[in-house]
């Protein structure tokens, strides 16, 4: 859920924990203190496994390779729309 959310939000400077929580709450109807604890554990696990990176501003981004793949995919979709 966290990886998907960071990818969908696609914020230039990374996604804050707050924006990730808000999106997941709206999209998946998840909230509450237990959810927040699980989310924080999930984020830490993704950092340790190097699936996401922490920016100097303490926001979260997809690792470099995944961001490039996503940008290429978006460019392909945009090109198909213009054709």
Image (cartoon, helix red, strand yellow):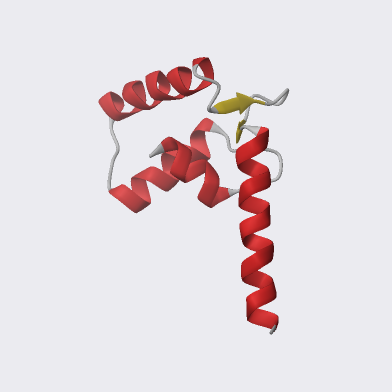
Q: Quadrant of the N terminus?
A: top left
Q: Residue at x 68, y 45 (%)?
A: 68
Q: Quadrant of the C terminus?
A: bottom right
Q: Residue at x 38, y 18 (%)?
A: 41
Q: Residue at x 64, y 43 (%)?
A: 67
Q: Which one is nearer the viewer's eye here, 11 or 73?
A: 73
Instruction: State whether residue 76 is above or below residue 65.
Output: below
The residue at the far bottom in this view is 83
Give the image location of residue 6, x and y in percent: 53, 42
Q: Residue at x 73, y 22 (%)?
A: 56
In the rendered structure, the answer to whether residue 53 lies left or right of residue 27 reads right
Q: Which one is nearer the viewer's eye here, 6 or 58?
A: 6
Q: In this view of the protein, can residue 11 be seen by the observer? A: no
Task: Count every numbered label the image shows and give the total.
Answer: 0
Q: In this view of the protein, can residue 27 be seen by the observer? A: yes
Give the image location of residue 58, x and y in percent: 64, 24
Instruction: State whether residue 82 is above or below residue 73.
Output: below
In the rendered structure, the answer to whether residue 15 lies left or right of residue 78 reads left
Give the image location of residue 33, x and y in percent: 29, 25
Give the image location of residue 62, x and y in percent: 59, 36
Instruction: State whether residue 25 is above or below residue 64.
Output: below
């Amino acid at each position: 859920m966290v990886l998907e959310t960071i990818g969908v939000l696609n914020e230039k400077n990374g996604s804050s924990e707050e924006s990730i929580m808000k999106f997941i709450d709206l999209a998946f109807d998840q909230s509450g203190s237990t959810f927040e604890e699980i989310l924080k554990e999930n984020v830490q696990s993704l950092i340790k496994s190097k699936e996401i990176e922490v920016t100097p501003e303490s926001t979260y981004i997809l690792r470099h390779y995944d961001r490039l793949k996503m940008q290429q995919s978006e460019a392909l979709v945009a090109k198909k729309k213009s054709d």
